[in-house]
Amino acid sequence: MPSLRVQLVVFLSLIAIAANTPAISQEIIDIGSRRELFVDDFLIDKLDNVRLELQHPQPQEITFACDKPWEGNTCIYFRIIPEAGRFRMWYQGAHWQIDPNDSKKTHPYHICYAESDDGIHWTKPNLGLVEVDGSKENNIVVTGVYDNFTPLRDDNPKCEPQAKYKALGQSRDGLIAWQSPDGIRWKQLGDKPVITKGAFDSQNVACWDASLNRYRAYIRDFHDGLRDIRVAFSDDFLTWTTPEPLKVSPAVEKEQFYINCIARYERAPHLFLGFPVRYVERPWSPSMKELPDLEHREMRAKAGERIGTAITDGAFMSSRDGLHFHRWTEAFLRIGPERPGSWVYGDCYPAHGLIETQSKLPGAPKEFSLFIAEHYWRSEEALRRWTLRIDGFVAAKAPLQGGELLTKPFTFTGHQLSLNFATSAAGSLHVELTDAQGKPLPGFSLADSDEHFGDSLDRTVTWKGETDVSSLAGKPVRLRFRLRDAELYSLRFEE
């Protein structure tokens, strides 16, 4: 019988082996040929000196000014939909006369329309539909809504032509359903609200969900006095389930969200991405009085203290079922440097709709543009364009000394592996394919992997110059990434 010392050595060795050997009893994930982003740990088994790091959009130019008489200082709830090589935008034209010396008076809400060929330069067509102040020369499509109105293009294959566009618009008693053949000429579907349980004073968004063969709506409500986000479902856009709260984690005590901007991510439709506005109420304090425009802040506070002292910024969350969301606790979108018109309740409200636009750098790939409202409460509001790398919401990032990411076991379809990644000049990325137990597969080991460096949205991985991985399709495998001063954003197996 081995001595106690030998038994102890063997026992400790087994522990060490177990600690460094991937579990073999994990469920095999089938990713097919879908794109996987590192917005969560769904595909990750182990990180060694690699961390998931939230990325942040960068501010660019002002692209849109709410400067018409029927617009104003509280325009809100922008919605952008790409269609047939152009971009279409709807938004709420509004003005609140906060300052008694403001020559512009408070006016009813008008739903306005704009369009663009490139997503950067916008025009406001003269539609001639709605009369305001004795003239129809404006870009208004609907007027007199109670608070908000958000269109969608209905991708339901059974949708009738006259209802190709739909919208949920708030009334005093709930959300009213609307329809339109073209997004311009709108018809209200009855006088009764189709969703009555909720607070609704936010951007309530809806979409057709082909995976469920029904409609989804994400709306705002309260729980325990706190603003939250809920989801409801419908087969016909008229009869909806009772909205249920989203399951958001990690939980943050007393955190509140206004608009949600939740939608399926078109480049990876199995993912839902949300860009909620985080609402923070703060009392008067020396720091509050150091923020910009104290006189204007005090003026707003006379209409309600929170209007002068609440502050908003932008968050990011993702989901694989549209109900359970992983939310990053740090801000995705910060307000930025203190400047006139900033650090107010109304900052960081994004337009609902993420679009691809050309980079200003000649020859560079496309990027995402997000449009963020600023100058809320001032004489006129504006939209600033912010840009982000495509798929670049979260990076799996390693320092120069290097690190590794090991995936869970999965199966795939396709012939080659494509990565969205970036390195420094000194950085690198190597890729290994292993079996389900983590054993390197012949021809696909780290030793076989060619070194990859650069900054690419779509780099095909090679092993000794070869790209074909079809021999492994359908078999349980893992990926091991060795990163040095590098970020990995997404992967996809392709034909």
Image (tube, grey):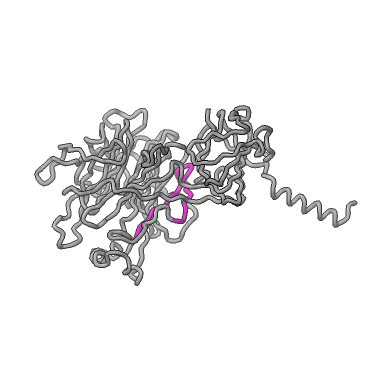
Up-down relation of residue 300 to residue 9 (above or below): below
**Residue 357, image x and y in percent?**
36, 39
For this orientation, the residue located farthest to the left is: 134
Q: Quarter-wise, where is residue 182 in the image? A: top left
Q: Quarter-wise, where is residue 282 in the image? A: bottom left
Q: Residue at x 51, y 43 (%)?
A: 422
Q: Using the rendered image of the protein, determine whether residue 119 is visible from the camera's viewpoint.
A: yes
For this orientation, the residue located farthest to the right is: 1
For this orientation, the residue located farthest to the bottom is: 286
**Residue 174, image x and y in percent?**
29, 48
Q: Using the rendered image of the protein, determine whether residue 197 is visible from the camera's viewpoint.
A: no
Q: Is residue 266 left or right of residue 64?
A: right
Q: Is residue 410 left or right of residue 166?
A: right
Who is closer to the viewer here, 219 or 456?
Answer: 456
Q: Residue at x 45, y 56 (%)?
A: 330
**Magenta stretch: includes residue 329:** yes
**Magenta stretch: includes residue 296:** no
Count of marks, rendered view = 0
Who is closer to the viewer here, 182 or 492?
Answer: 492
Q: Magenta span covers which residues?
A: 311-330
Q: Is residue 96 left or right of residue 457?
A: left
Q: Residue at x 15, y 62 (%)?
A: 101
Q: Residue at x 47, y 48 (%)?
A: 325
**Residue 154, image x and y in percent?**
33, 34
Who is closer to the viewer here, 143 or 93?
Answer: 93
